Amino acid sequence: MSFLDEVPWNDQQLIPVITQDEATGKVLTLAWMNREALAQTVERGEAVYWSRSRKKLWRKGEESGHVQKVREIRLDCDSDAVLLRVEQAGGIACHTGRERCFFRKLEKGRWVETDPVLKDPSLIYKK
Amino acid sequence: MSFLDEVPWNDQQLIPVITQDEATGKVLTLAWMNREALAQTVERGEAVYWSRSRKKLWRKGEESGHVQKVREIRLDCDSDAVLLRVEQAGGIACHTGRERCFFRKLEKGRWVETDPVLKDPSLIYKK
């Protein structure tokens, strides 16, 4: 597919992907995709990332159920970042059970947690 | 400063930084910071990035005047991405003269430009 060819995949064959909640406008996560992940995301209409830690495709929500339905996919000016606008199932994007991964804020030189845990991760991940 | 030590700088000593317009909620850019850039961003209250192409610190707006006043700095769960919420001077973040760098949208397998050029880049960059 030609739109995949316009992405200058980095030396690890990845591109960073910002995911934003369509309803709230909050930035939920920064994750990564390879070519196959972006292709599957478009085909399925749900976010599929490349897990750098597990070194495999990661269908977001495959364990947690916290699927991200993709409403819009954008590419930046130099084609080295993708922006997804999604509908976040369950209202939880972070593996810690929080709405978003960016739950720490810099205050007076310290990273301070500002967002509550909405669901205990042990109840999200049954394995 | 200790908050800098909590960032696991990557093998290039960088971290990706998402910058979001505080007023509109739009994601403007994805850029990169090294330790010095993040330290200066906090000290100055204005975004300072690391330019990977020019291999030097990049005080956003130093040529264009399109400074980003920082209202909030956030860190994600595994500390490998930063989120800035900013006030964007001039309403233009992209070097193409557009509001944001994510001005292309995937439509039926093609990246389609959706955002207008607000100011001719030749009028932004005088050098």
Image (spheres, coloured by chain):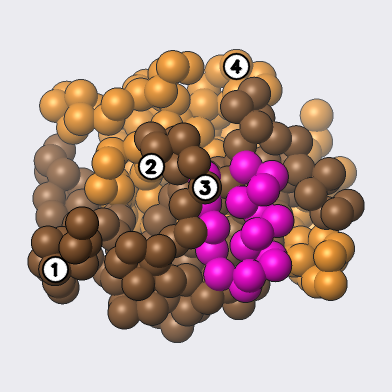
Chain colours: A brown, B orange
Q: CA distance from mark 3 to mark 4?
A: 32 Å
Q: Mark 4 highlights which residue? A: B55
Label 3: how many residues lie within 10 Å, few (<14), some (14-19) or many (20+)? Answer: some
Whether pointer 2 and pointer 3 mark residues with C-beta atoms closer than 8 Å, the reply is no
Are discs 1 and 3 located on one and the same chain? yes
Q: Nearer the viewer, residue B65 or B54?
A: B54
Q: Residue furthest bottom?
A: A23
Q: Mark 2 highlights which residue? A: B81
Tell me the residue at 12%/41% (across/down): A110
Q: Nearer the viewer, residue A48 or A72?
A: A48
What is the three-letter code of the residue carrying label 4?
Lys
Q: Mark 3 highlights which residue? A: A57
Are discs 2 and 4 located on one and the same chain? yes
Tell me the residue at 54%/63% (across/down): A47
What is the three-letter code of the residue carrying label 3?
Leu
Element marked by disc 2: loop
The magenta-colored residue range is A34-50
